[in-house]
Image (cartoon, rainbow, N blue to C red):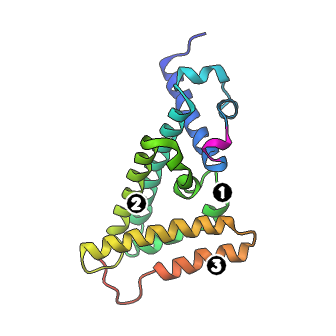
């Protein structure tokens, strides 16, 4: 039975959304095509009408996740024009981002796996991470563009690192301490120059 173009597109988006959640939760190699299709409510055989391989699905799902992350960061910063960095720190360095792997940060969940999945995947993550650096460059304190760029790289490293380390803890207090210490260190001090 053939499906309409609209239904085909809807099914593809559903596969991408489900794959994005499952990849973040289980890793690229921790989930198979059959499990992804079952979770999407579709048959395994229908997969190859949408994608040539699991690797193609992983790349496409990652591109969608990276774009969504960048949009979310921009929205959070814009929604608090007086304190955009503080808003972003509160949003990102949150308990939710630590415990909800399937819907949390794609970079905290999958960055460690990217180098094993080829140049296209690395390019996707490079573009996404540089997009986040760009958001931070506009809101971190600093007197020169070079200083703000350096602080943006350091801030992003600290933020993603804090979430990764908080996820590794078997103690919720220590997990929270990674988040709060990072938030405190990255929050501008009174009188620090903002761009």
Q: Quadrant of residue 39?
A: top right
Mark 2 or mark 1: which comes first in sequence? 1
The residue singled out by tag 2 in the image is 132
- Is residue 109 depicted above or below 91 in this figure? above
Q: Measured from the top left, where is residue 31 in percent x and y?
A: 67, 39
Q: Quadrant of residue 3?
A: top right
**Separation of marks 2 and 3 at Cα, in angstroms:** 24 Å
**Separation of marks 3 and 1 at Cα, in angstroms:** 18 Å
Q: Quadrant of residue 179?
A: bottom right
Q: Nearer the viewer, mark 3 or mark 1?
A: 3
Mark 3 or mark 1: which comes first in sequence? 1
**Separation of marks 2 and 1 at Cα, in angstroms:** 20 Å
The foreground one among 163 and 81 is: 163
With 166 as the anchor, is 194 left or right in this view?
left
The foreground one among 108 and 113 is: 113
Q: Measured from the top left, where is residue 50 in percent x and y?
A: 52, 24
Q: Is residue 93 visible?
A: no
Q: Residue at (67%, 61%) from the top-left corner?
A: 99
Q: Residue at (58%, 33%) from the top-left corner?
A: 15
Span colored in magenta: 27-31
Image quarter (top left, top right, bottom left or bottom right) of the C terminus: bottom left
Q: Tag 3, which secondary structure?
A: helix
Local packing at callout 1 (Cα closer than 10 Å; few below 14, some 14-19, many 20+) is some
Mark 2 or mark 3: which comes first in sequence? 2
């Amino acid at each position: 039975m053939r499906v309409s173009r609209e239904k085909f597109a809807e099914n593809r988006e559903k596969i991408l959304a489900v794959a994005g959640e499952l990849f973040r939760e289980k890793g690229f190699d921790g989930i198979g095509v059959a499990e992804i299709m079952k979770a999407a409510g579709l048959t395994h055989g229908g997969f190859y009408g949408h994608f040539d391989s699991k690797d193609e699905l992983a790349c496409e799902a990652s591109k969608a996740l990276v774009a969504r992350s960048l949009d979310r960061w921009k929205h959070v910063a814009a929604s608090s024009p007086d304190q955009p960095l503080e808003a972003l720190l509160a949003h990102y360095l949150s308990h939710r981002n630590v415990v909800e792997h399937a819907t949390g940060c794609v970079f905290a969940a999958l960055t460690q796996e990217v180098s094993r999945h080829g140049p296209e995947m690395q390019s996707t993550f490079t573009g996404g991470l540089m997009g986040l650096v760009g958001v931070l460059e506009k809101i971190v304190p600093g007197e020169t563009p070079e200083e703000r760029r350096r602080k943006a790289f350091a801030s992003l490293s600290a933020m993603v690192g804090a979430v990764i380390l908080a996820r590794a803890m078997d103690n919720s207090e220590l997990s929270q301490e990674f988040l709060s210490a990072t938030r405190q260190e990255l929050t501008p001090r009174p009188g620090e120059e903002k761009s």
